[in-house]
Image (cartoon, grey):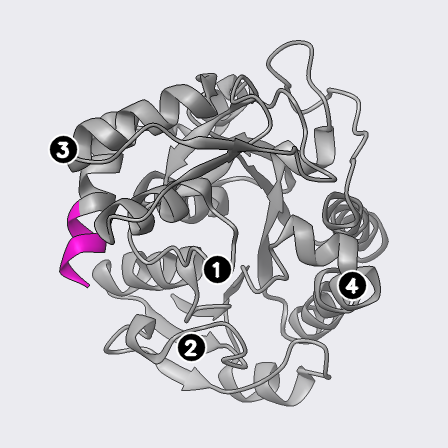
Amino acid sequence: MRAIVTGGAGFIGSHVADALLARGDEVHVVDNMATGKRENLPAGAEHHERDIREPLEDLFDEVRPDACFHLAAQADVNVSTQRPDYDAEVNVLGTIRVLEAARRVGARVVFSSTGGAIYGECDRPADEDYPRRPLSPYGTAKLCAEEYLGTWNRLHGTSHVVLRFANVYGPRQDSGLEGGVVAIFLERLAKDEPTAIFGDGEQTRDFVYVGDVARATLAALQVDGGAFNIGAGVETTVTELHELCLRVAGRGEPPVYAEARLGDVRRSVLEVSRAARELRWRPEVSLEDGLRRSWEWTTAS
């Protein structure tokens, strides 16, 4: 298969590109390097330094991909509250550019959306039909982009797929970009710096390892359209996460607590049985094992 991976020099995108190359696919990475890192670019992939906010038809016409894994995004909730116009330019307009370029060559799009940010507060594990009530511009933009995919499927007869990720963590996550709490905790523990929890620490999240997410992203090509939650399906408090981070690091002090941040939800956990049933995908890496792998990468990099 010939594939384009947008955001392929970023955290999740580089793992997806690695997984494609490992099975022998031809991979083209599209990344403007605004937040992507050259050390994340997989050997064997061809890099096209392009911005998804600009037209991409010429590139898709040249590459003629069978599939496009659209992972380029503005992925920080805090940035979205401070710069909602920029967030929408990347996450909405950028997605439309990808859809239009893919339509010209008949490429299937697998779109990386977000579970926690589009469902908002959850009173139970959210399945794919759970009410979508985002509390941040980031969640709203991702939900809007999902609707564009659905419209393209109805209007043009395409079969693009939406994957709603839980809180993804693992090697290559940048503590300053995605705002990943795991990366932040482990980086500060590695530097023997104090750690902070925003809020009371009882807020819950669904943490899923990036390698499992990459497998799910490739598995999405098996289905003709639809939306799928991709998570561990396990609720973990931020305080519990911090304790696990201390355990795998073998060091560190209790965290300090700070005021909760605007746009952060209280409870977020996904129901993932549809992915198990239709994608034949299940998460394989436990949280403690994934944290250990992340710690080893943090201390080695």
**Tag shown at residue 83:** 4
Q: Which residue is mark 1?
A: 176
Q: Is residue 38 left or right of residue 82?
A: left
> In terms of sequence position, does the residue under pointer 4 or pointer 1 come before the other?
4
Q: Position of residue 121 (x, y in %)?
A: 72, 22
Q: Position of residue 102 (x, y in %)?
A: 65, 70
User: In the picture, residue 55 is in which quadrant?
Assistant: bottom right
Three-letter code, disc 2: His
Three-letter code, disc 3: Gly
> In terms of sequence position, does the residue under pointer 4 or pointer 3 come before the other?
4
Q: Is residue 282 above or below residue 223?
A: above
> In terms of sequence position, does the residue under pointer 3 or pointer 1 come before the other?
1
> In terms of sequence position, does the residue under pointer 4 or pointer 2 come before the other?
2
> In terms of sequence position, does the residue under pointer 2 or pointer 3 come before the other?
2
Alpha-carbon span between mark 4 and mark 1:
16 Å
**Tag shown at residue 28:** 2
Depth check, front residue: 254 or 98: 254
